[in-house]
């Protein structure tokens, strides 16, 4: 199983981890000052696993995914993919690594060149890698079939003719064309209807098994993450709140923030339409985060210690970690 990594956690980096993130920090500079979008996030991911990263908008989950590919600059910590340190890899080496580490973005339509046909889009990575036009033309029908888009119907289409779900299938096919080992999915179904979400999730599961993919799946919808993830990492305002086996985290959340996220999941059969009471208050500004525990201003069980002392990640149950002074039973 994947584990936490690096300083401040119970596990050191596993030698067999395909991806190891240790104390990752990402900073943004604005006219109002500098803030940490990601502040010390650590985890290990073993080959063939899926890690779900969840949290509200602005928690740093997408930035974490982008930093793994060095699409956002790494201000501190280490990201290791195989034997390569991402933060110190040369530009030429990063171009090679990005063939092995592919990303699927939240808005499928905007990630596709509107002037290229579907067959050109799915083989875009092959073209960049120097594969001949003849070979690309041979691979395109197979790639489209794999993602549920029959070539005879979709090969010549332009992106504007596609539905959201079809565009996301093209994006998935494009990512898989270069046979990556790691797939980072950044909110890949959040812009899709519920029925289409299920189709894309099933497609990802099938492709993961077929190609032995390792996946980082980023989402704010906890229901989606539970269905696909082996482990879950919960983030709040740039920090990790909780980490553990997906079933254990969902059935027995240890952090009050995780409990709040679960309570906020729509549940039509429940009074009020949600699983429990909604989270109170708004996400604080990352330019001026609260002292101590960053969640304390919204936490229903916060005490004086939460304001004066920042909690560290610790194992509260076997394999389940939480950064909380007073974890839930």
Image (tube, grey):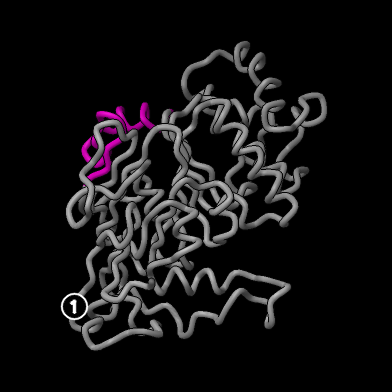
Which sits in the foreground, 148 or 214?
Answer: 214
Across and down, in percent, residue 129 comes to 46, 21
Q: Can you say whether 100 is above or below 225 in the image?
A: above
> In the image, 236: left or right of 34?
right
Q: Which residue is mark 1?
A: 309
| Depth order, front residue of 326/312 | 326
Q: Position of residue 17 (x, y in %)?
A: 31, 35
Residue at left offset 73%, top offset 73%: 269
Q: Is residue 104 left or right of residue 75?
A: right
x then y, percent, for residue 11: 23, 47
Residue at x 45%, y 57% (from the top left corner): 248
Residue sitting nearer the eye, 120 or 328:
328
Query: In the rendered view of the protein, which quadrant contains the C terminus?
Result: bottom left
As for residue 81 lying within the magenta part, the answer is yes
Between residue 235 and residue 28, name the one nearer to us.
Answer: 235
Q: Is residue 188 left or right of residue 193?
A: left
Query: Above or below — where is 135 with respect to 37?
Result: above
Residue 62 lies in the magenta-colored region: no
Residue 20 to residue 177: above or below: below
Residues in magenta, as a range: 78-99
Q: Is residue 206 above or below residue 112?
A: above
Q: Position of residue 38 (x, y in %)?
A: 31, 60
Quarter of the image where one finds residue 310: bottom left
Q: Element under label 1? A: loop
């Amino acid at each position: 199983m994947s584990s936490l990594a690096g300083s401040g956690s119970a596990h050191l980096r596993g030698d067999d981890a395909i991806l190891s993130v240790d104390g990752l920090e990402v900073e943004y500079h604005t006219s109002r000052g500098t803030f940490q979008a990601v502040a010390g996030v650590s985890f290990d991911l073993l080959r063939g696993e899926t890690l779900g990263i969840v949290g509200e908008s602005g928690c740093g989950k997408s930035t974490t995914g982008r930093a793994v590919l060095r699409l956002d600059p790494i201000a501190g910590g280490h990201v290791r993919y195989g034997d390569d340190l991402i933060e110190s890899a040369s530009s030429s080496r990063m171009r090679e690594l990005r063939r092995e580490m592919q990303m699927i973005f939240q808005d499928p339509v905007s990630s596709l060149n509107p002037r290229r046909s579907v067959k050109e889009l799915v083989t875009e990575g092959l073209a960049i890698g120097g594969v001949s036009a003849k070979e690309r033309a041979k691979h395109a029908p197979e790639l489209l079939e794999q993602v549920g888009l029959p070539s005879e119907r979709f090969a010549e289409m332009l992106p504007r003719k596609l539905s959201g779900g079809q565009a996301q299938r093209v994006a998935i096919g494009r990512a898989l064309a270069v046979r990556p080992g790691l797939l980072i999915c950044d909110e890949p179904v959040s812009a899709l209807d519920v029925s289409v979400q299920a189709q894309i999730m099933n497609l990802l599961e099938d492709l993961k098994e077929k190609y032995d993919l390792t996946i980082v799946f980023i989402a704010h919808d906890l229901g989606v993450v539970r269905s696909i993830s082996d482990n879950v990492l919960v983030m709040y305002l740039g920090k990790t709140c909780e980490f553990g086996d997906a079933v254990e985290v969902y059935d027995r959340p240890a952090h009050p923030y995780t409990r709040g996220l679960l309570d906020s999941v729509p549940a039509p059969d429940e009074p009020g339409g949600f699983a429990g009471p909604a989270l109170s208050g708004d996400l604080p500004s990352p330019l001026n985060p609260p002292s101590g525990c960053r969640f304390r201003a919204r936490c229903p069980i916060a005490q004086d210690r939460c304001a004066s002392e920042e909690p560290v990640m610790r194992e509260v149950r076997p394999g389940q970690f939480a950064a909380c002074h007073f974890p839930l039973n």
